[in-house]
Amino acid sequence: MLRFDKRRRNLEQDDYTFELQDVKEPNLYRDMFSYGQVPKIPFNYRLSPMDPPEDIWITDTTFRDGQQSRPPFTVKQIVDLYDLLHQLGGKQGLIRQCEFFLYTDKDKEAVVKCLERGYKYPEVTGWIRANKKDFKLAKEMGLKETGILTSASDYHIFLKLGKTRRQAMEDYLDIVRSALEVGIIPRCHFEDITRADFYGFVVPFAQELMKLSEESKIPIKIRCCDTMGYGVGYPGAMLPRSVAGIVYGLSHFAKVPPENLEWHGHNDFYRAASNATTAWLYGCSGANGTLLGIGERTGNTPVEALVIEYMSLRGDDSIDTTLITDIANYFRKEIGHHIPPNQPLVGSHFNVTMAGVHLDGLLKNEEIYNIFDTRKLLKIPPGVAVNDKSGVAGILHWIKVNLDVPKGDLTKSHPGIAKIKDWVVEQYAKGRVTTISDEEMMEQTRKHLPELFELPQEAVESLETA
């Protein structure tokens, strides 16, 4: 049948019916995933229409997927990070939900304490095994929604579960019915969707879920899990690797509402952030991530990256991005987590430059070599690490940033800066390979520019009076 789509103002085919293809042998897409070779990215040039939802948001899995990659957080650390997520997401709830384990006493205590905060956002949700008994646990904890593992690829259905597609789908639907019976919103995690038979399993399964949702009047959510990071955002890429194709297909063929679609990506091929953004652009409201991108293997989409992407896409400047730095500092100081120095937005050297020619431009105008006003948006001024490539420009910039020297009060021609440069050059001539530390730079600055450390006369008089 045809229907007129009021939003797109076109006639469209209304009913798409896809039958489950209950194959005898698993389809492992060996032409793409030969295992002994780098995975291939084929194209069929079919373009999905870009169709961003009216509302997009972020969901968090730091306390579930993120925690699988590291020593468990303490209850206090979970609650503290949950508070920071609440603040970062703002009143509008940009960070819509947080996902929690429910199994250990510590998991349960953390859930209770976070619920006691009474925040509307992020909503506390659970993650359980595809086990009917676990729904009772989620219900007892007072949760309205929980994730359920519903693996989608034949790698999982045949090779891990030892089932046929039909057996797997019937088991999944049975579990979902159990959730609906107790009034819990099920969030079905389509694990390994980027290696799944999209029209032979994913769409037929999603269509059955939408039927159950219509019958029960309870939303059923679908999380598209790019478990191995195989998803690609290139226009015209083939399924099952096409992020646009997956999101469009679930929306258009299975009629999954955008607010019930969520993308969960991993960073095995450096695509986690761009794939999440692609999912937003093609009709998925939710993008799932973790703080600092922690998670199994190469990690998840970083929540802080999603915050910046959201602001870039929607022009929303109401988010307090300085909280990103507060979160990074909490991980460093309270948790003892090592953040790679060059990690975007949160690494200690993410806006630090070393090349002299770059530093010369930075001195003239910091916009030339700084991504945005990091001093304003992240509480971190553009920095410099001094080495044999820094030259007098690098030394001057280090002094100005670290000693807060007013613009114009110190220039590259100062003889003290030349002496520090000579000292730096001598260090590397002797075979040094590391950068000059801040402590060493401070010592050299005190030696060759002592006037920068002398108190003004009024300050001296103030101290004497006191």
Image (cartoon, grey):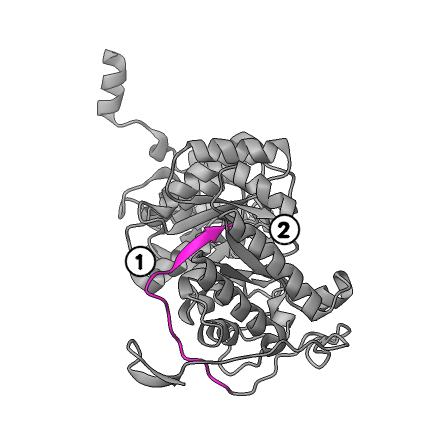
**Left or right: 58 with respect to 189?**
left
Q: Residue at x 28, y 77 (%)?
A: 6
Q: Please, is residue 389 above or below residue 144 in the view? A: below
Give the x, y percent position of residue 388. Answer: 54, 54
**Left or right: 372 with respect to 229?**
left
Mark 2 lies on a secondary structure that is loop
Q: Amino acid at mark 2?
A: Val
Of pointers 2 and 1, the one earlier in the residue sequence? 1
Residue 15, picture quadrant: bottom left
Q: Which residue, given by chain and number where applicable, does mark 1 sit on? A: 365
Q: Residues within 10 Å of mark 1 (few under 14, many from 20)?
A: few
Queried whether the magenta region covers residue 55, the answer comes back as: yes
Q: Please, is residue 171 above or below residue 253 in the view? A: above
Query: Which numbered marker is on residue 433?
Result: 2
Q: Which residues are magenta?
A: 46-60
Q: Residues within 10 Å of mark 2 (few under 14, many from 20)?
A: few
Residue 443 or residue 117, whichever sits in front: 117
Give the x, y percent position of residue 78. Answer: 52, 36
